[in-house]
Image (spheres, grey):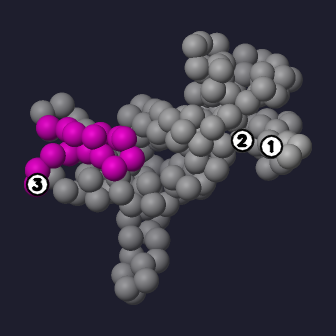
Amino acid sequence: MQEHSDTTGGTAPSDTELVRRIRAAAEPGGRLSAGPYGGPVPDGTAGSGEEALNEFHRRHYAAVLAYARDCCRSSQAAADLTKEAINGVLHSPGPEETSDAAWRDSLLAAVRHTAAAWHQHSRNTELRDDFASWLAAQPGEGPGPADGWAPTAGAAGRPPAARPRPV
C-alpha cells in the first residue's frame, strides 16, 4: 500500500485505502446521508468513511472539476459532472490495489465517459458546443474509463478548451 507524507511527520493512507474505507462505509446495513460533495457518507459513529471521503475529495476534487469545466458551459454543470464522475468511480467495482496516479486517471476518464453519456441524453445542452465535434473525432464508441482510451484533441488529453469570447 502506498502512503502519502503528512505534514505532521506521519503518513496518510493511499487513495486505494481511502476508497476501500469509503466503499466499506457505503455497504448495505450502514445508514448513509449526503456528504459535503454530494457523495454518500456514513451516518453516526462510522466517521472513518466520512473522513476518507473528505480526504479523497481534498486530493482530487479540484483537478476533476477543472477537467469537467473543459466539457461544460457552466460552472454548475461542471460541478454536477464532477460529482457524477467521482461517485461513479467510488461506487463501481474497481481495482483493489493500484497506484494513486491510476485513481486520478480513472476519475478523469469517468468525466469523459459521463460527458459522453450526457451528450447522448437530455443533459447535452449543458455541454460546450464544440464537445460534440471533439467527441465525434474520437476513435471507436467514445471515451470510457476501462478501455485505456486517451483523447487526441486538446492539450493534456483534454477536450478543447473554451475559446475567448468577444466583449
Residue 47: image location, x then y, percent: 19, 56
Q: Residue at x 66, y 43 (%)?
A: 69
Residue at the extreme top: 121
Is 40 inside the magenta-drawn segment? Answer: yes
Residue in the picture at 27% in, 40% down:
34
Q: Amino acid at mark 3?
A: Thr
Mark 2 or 3: the one toward you: 2
Q: What's the residue at 26%, 53% (across, down)?
A: 50
Q: CA distance from mark 1 to mark 3?
A: 43 Å
CA neighbours of label 1 inside 10 A, class few (<14), some (14 to 19), many (20+)? some
Question: Is the Cβ of the residue at disc 2 closer than 8 Å to that at disc 3?
Answer: no
Over which residues does the magenta segment extend? 31-45
| Residue behind mark 1 | 161
- SS at mark 3 in the image: loop
Secondary structure beneath dot 2 equals: loop
Q: Quadrant of the N terminus?
A: bottom left
Tag count? 3
Q: Which mark is residue 83?
A: none
Verify whether residue 72 appears in magenta: no
